[in-house]
């Protein structure tokens, strides 16, 4: 899982986790062949759906130009650390998102076409749309489910 391959700056943990929109639980694989093998297995066994990020073959999306505006903390990916081989996956998940300090800056920039997330974890999609609410850290089920069950 991507979450296990990166370290997130504690100051920006809410923002980064919210910006990921579920991709922190994606499985990171080497290439599309491996990804296709995973999806075939899921379908055959009717195990449900997962998100998969192949590190080879990801299109390197251009990071947004960082506007010179008060309240902009920086691109979301700069608040993560990972091994070089996972940087493409991090860029894929966070490359188009700016972390900002407040809702006003987030709203202003989203109306200009930027995807933004506040340090409190409110996500403003480019051009409109907002995801907000109470932030709850992901639950680590492995700590409450016996491993030999």
Image: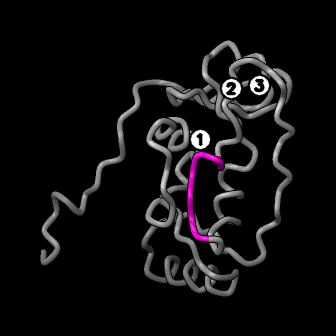
Tag 3–tag 1 contact (CB < 8 Å)? no
Q: Nearer the viewer, residue 103 or 87?
A: 87
Q: Position of residue 81 (x, y in %)?
A: 56, 58
**Image check: 144 left or right of 19?**
left
| Residue at point 59%, 46% (across, down) | 79
Give the crowd class for mark 3: few <14, some 14-19, many >=20 residues within 10 Å: many
Disc 2 crowd rating (10 Å Cα; few below 14, some 14-19, many 20+) is few
Contact? badges 2 and 3 (CB < 8 Å): yes
Is there a contact, CB below 8 Å, between mark 2 and mark 1? no
- At 55% from the left and 42% from the top, the residue drawn is 16
Magenta-drawn stretch contains 40: no
Magenta-colored span: 77-83
Residue designated by label 1: 19
Select label 2 or label 3 by which is in front: 3
19 vs 5: above or below: above
Question: Which residue is located at x 30 percent, y 49 percent?
Answer: 139
Mark earlier in primary sequence (3, 1): 1
Q: Quadrant of the C terminus?
A: bottom left
Label 2 – label 3 distance at C-alpha: 9 Å
In space, the residues marked 2 and 1 are separated at their CA atoms by 13 Å
Does 64 sit above or below residue 42? above
Disc number at residue 129? Answer: 2
**Does 97 sit left or right of 123 as displayed?**
right
Circle on res. 110: 3
């Amino acid at each position: 899982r991507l979450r296990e391959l990166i370290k997130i700056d504690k100051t920006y943990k809410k923002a980064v986790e919210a910006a990921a929109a579920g991709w922190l639980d994606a499985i990171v694989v080497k290439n599309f062949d491996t990804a296709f093998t995973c999806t075939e297995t899921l379908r055959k066994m009717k195990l449900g759906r997962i998100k998969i990020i192949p590190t080879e073959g990801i299109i390197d999306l251009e990071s947004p130009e960082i506007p010179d505006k008060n309240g902009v903390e920086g691109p979301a990916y700069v608040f993560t650390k990972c091994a070089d081989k996972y940087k493409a996956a991090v860029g894929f998940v966070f490359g188009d998102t700016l972390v900002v300090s407040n809702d006003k800056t987030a709203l202003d920039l989203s109306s200009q076409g930027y995807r933004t997330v506040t340090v409190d974890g409110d996500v403003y999609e480019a051009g409109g749309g907002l995801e907000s609410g109470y932030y709850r850290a992901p639950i680590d089920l492995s700590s409450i489910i016996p491993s030999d069950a």
